[in-house]
Amino acid sequence: MTTEALSTSSIQLSTTSSSPSFRWQSVYMAYGVIMFFVLIIGFFGNVFTILVLRQREHRMKSITPLMVNLALADLFIIVFGYPAIIVSNLNGDLLFPESPLCVWSGFANGFSGMTCIATLTVMSGVVYQTVKRNFPPAHNVVPKRQITLLIASTWLYGFIVMLPPLVGWNRFVPGQAGFSCAPEWTAPNVASKAYISVLIVVGFLTPLVIIAVYYTLTFRTLKRRPMTGNAFLQAQRRKYQNKSILMTAVTIGAFLLSWSPYAFVSLTATVKGHQVMTSGESEIPELMAKASVIYNPIIYTFINDKFRHTLWGILSGNRGIILPRGRSGSEEPTEHGSVNAVHVSSRDQ
């Protein structure tokens, strides 16, 4: 352990111990308990998401592989990142700059987050292509090989964006309260500030702009497209497309809502050269960002009727569920314009 690391941790400990309003052990315990519940809810929610999406009635949809990828990215940080930090928090242990646990915590959090935002960016593009080509919901608008490459690129993107601190361009250090680690937002040297700028622009602002462009194009396409051909079939297809757009938009919105406060606070700290929030306050945006792993399963369940029916079938042990006609997200328009009830038997598993 370096002298600088010991000095930093001693300052943290003396600050938290000398302040009567900041009982660091109690706060560490509270943080650990909250993170434990995030871990449990996030783990089971994302595991069930994958189980649902692997069922026959979901596998052929264009955005399903990307939804699975989001769940896998969340499970990565839930399984490989959060447990070690939770144990450290519950024990009241301090994290030290550039220690193995600190480095892994900072890298894993950033890697998972960058992979998720890259996946959401790709998802917005796939939704646009589906609407532009006016394909049925069950049609794979992106070939399997191409979607595999896109998914692999999201993980590569996350790794590359978070690689510089591992090789000396910036570093991973504990946050203001010492609960977990992240890139050093307030580093004084120019090289570290340059990395933070690249991280914010490439890892957050650029995907945000791309998503905004794709959704603008998507809504413009829907608005300008005339209802030609079989009116009933086109109306059902439009309903599917709107449902898909709504679900992906809410998913993206929830992710951005979770991460935006953290990104804003971090960028402000970089510009000012010092932290702009107290130790307790600074953990609020961090917790919001980490809690993003629990939102997607909830969004899918509330918005997507077919997802909800399949989930209930899995939980109840009854996969022989008939998805009723006339329920949004449940009916499948056929090539002849009819809408049939979809029966899912145990043989389809």
Image (spheres, helix red, strand yellow):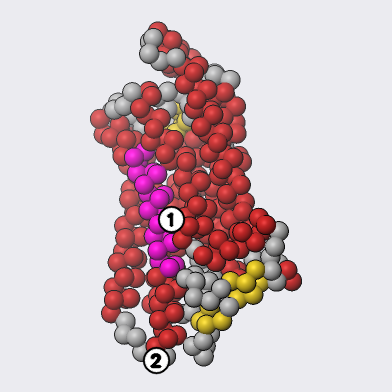
Q: Element under label 1? A: helix
Q: Which mark is residue 229?
A: 2
> In the rendered image of this protein, does residue 205 appear above or below residue 230?
above
Tell whether label 1 touches label 2 (CB within 8 Å).
no
Residue 262 figure quarter? top left
Is residue 250 within the magenta segment? yes
* 288 inside magenta stretch: no
Task: Give the overall secondary structure of the magenta segment.
Answer: helix
Q: Is label 2 in a helix, a strand or a loop?
A: loop
**Residue at 44% over, 35% down:** 287
* Residue type for callout 2: Gly
> What segment is highlighted magenta in the picture?
243-263
Give the position of the C terminus as an image quadrant: bottom right
Residue plotted at (52% across, 57% down): 301
Which residue is depicted at the point 40% across and 63% down? 246
Depicted 129 relative to depicted 159: above or below:
below
**Viewer-proximal residue, 103 or 86?**
86
Q: Residues within 10 Å of mark 1 (few under 14, many from 20)?
A: many
Q: Amino acid at mark 1?
A: Thr
Q: Using the image, tell me which numbered label, if any, was put on residue 173.
A: none
> Residue 257 in the image: x percent, y percent?
36, 47
Question: For residue 251, which numbered disc appears in the image?
Answer: 1
Q: CA distance from mark 2 to mark 1?
A: 32 Å
Taking depth in this image into account, of 142 and 41 the one nearest to the observer is 41
Q: Is residue 144 left or right of residue 248?
A: right
Residue 222 placement, left or right of 181: left
Q: How many marks?
A: 2
